[in-house]
Image (spheres, rainbow, N blue to C red):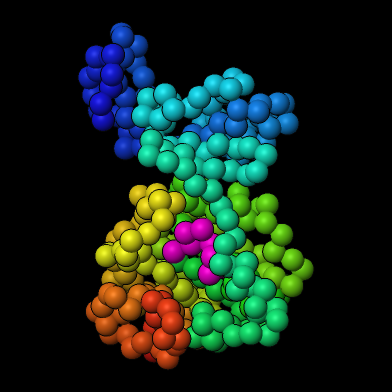
């Protein structure tokens, strides 16, 4: 990191914090903090403080029309900016926020009786429980919540606190509807979380690993990749998921990678008009 107009010296601090001496003053850089948009009022400050409390990160007060650009890299590595249109994640290279996107269209099609590849491969039905081990921005979790209905349950794990907060706050503001089950967002590493669960805890366990070789994408997706988990899905984690699943472990992949084949999974029949492919494997033998 480059500091302009300041002398600095790195110190040894806790893993989640970094500190420097700037102009004789010790400055601590937090990985994530919450602030408000430029249109500051008392209600927005209360909401931002509540967001900070929910995710256990600091709240940084902001004056009206004050730029947060100087804060990025000096006060926080990334910021959750709370505004009238929701929560936006900012870092030094850009910003993005929660958007239902294709999940909204997929839910509309499901309501119209049209098929969905995820629902078909996972054989989702009313009352099911689904563990999404790679929540991201909750696109597949939102589809699952409609497929399992109000009697079902969806739990989404997100290792990145920043992405988990964006998804969690976005879902708080998005009306899933009375025909959908709740989505619980958990900040956790799926590799460790799965080990804490009893066998057959969920009907379906789902993974959508970040592709190692992405195709050309939009700037917002590039930023998403900066915050997302990049560790590949391993055979050990897949076997742990098979222990936890009652019906299927489903893995989402791409035609231009061999990720599924490396895990010993066959592509499920799907549309030839998309790069997305699906693999699945049943639960492990009873222990």
Residue 264 position within the rendered picture, expressed as x and y whole percent measured from the top left: 28, 85
Query: Quick one: which residue is furthest to the top in this view?
Result: 24
Residue 35 appears at what percent x and percent y? 56, 31
**In the image, what residue occupies the spot 53% across and 26% down?**
60
The residue located at (56%, 67%) in the rendering is 102
Report x, y in % for residue 261: 27, 82
Q: Position of residue 111 (x, y in %)?
A: 70, 78
- Judge by depth and name the residue closer to the eye, 217 or 166: 217
Q: Is residue 154 above or below residue 171?
A: below
Q: Which image quadrant for residue 275?
A: bottom left
138 in the magenta segment: yes
Q: In the rendered view of the protein, which quadrant contains the C terminus?
A: bottom left
Asked whether, in this view, residue 69 is left or right of residue 81, the answer is left
The range drawn in magenta is 134-141
Residue 184 position (above or below residue 269): above
Is 169 located above or below residue 17 in the figure?
below
Q: Is residue 146 visible?
A: no
Please tell me which residue lies in front, 251 or 85: 85
* Count of labels in the image: 0
Left or right of residue 189: residue 137? right
Prevalent SS, magenta region? loop
Most extreme residue toward the right, as rendered? 178
* Residue 264 as seen in the image, left or right of residue 113: left
Q: Is residue 235 magenta?
A: no
Residue located at (70% from left, 81% from top):
112
């Amino acid at each position: 990191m480059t500091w302009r107009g300041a002398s600095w010296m790195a110190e040894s601090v806790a893993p989640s914090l970094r500190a420097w001496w700037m102009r004789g003053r010790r400055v601590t850089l937090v990985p994530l903090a919450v602030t408000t948009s430029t249109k500051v009022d008392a209600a927005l400050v209360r909401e931002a403080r509540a967001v900070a409390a929910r995710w256990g990160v600091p709240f940084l007060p902001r004056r009206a029309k004050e730029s947060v650009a100087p804060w990025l890299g000096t006060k926080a590595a990334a910021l959750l900016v709370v505004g009238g249109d929701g929560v936006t994640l900012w870092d030094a290279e850009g910003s993005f926020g929660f958007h239902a996107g294709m999940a909204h269209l997929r839910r509309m099609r499901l309501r119209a009786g049209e098929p969905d590849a995820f629902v078909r491969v996972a054989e989702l039905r009313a009352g099911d429980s689904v563990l999404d081990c790679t929540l991201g921005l909750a696109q597949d979790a939102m589809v699952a919540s409609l497929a399992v209905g109000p009697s079902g349950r969806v739990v989404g794990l997100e290792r990145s606190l920043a992405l988990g907060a964006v998804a969690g706050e976005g879902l708080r503001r998005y009306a899933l509807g009375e025909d959908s089950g709740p989505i619980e967002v958990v900040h956790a590493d799926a590799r460790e979380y799965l080990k804490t669960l009893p066998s057959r805890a969920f009907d379906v366990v789902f993974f959508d690993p970040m592709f190692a070789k992405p195709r050309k994408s939009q700037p917002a997706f590039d930023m998403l990749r900066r915050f997302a988990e990049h560790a590949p899905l391993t055979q050990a984690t897949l076997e742990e998921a098979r222990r936890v699943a009652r019906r299927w472990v489903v893995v989402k992949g791409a035609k231009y990678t061999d990720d599924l084949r490396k895990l010993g999974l066959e592509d499920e029949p799907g549309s030839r008009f998309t790069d997305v492919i699906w693999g699945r494997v049943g639960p492990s033998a009873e222990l």
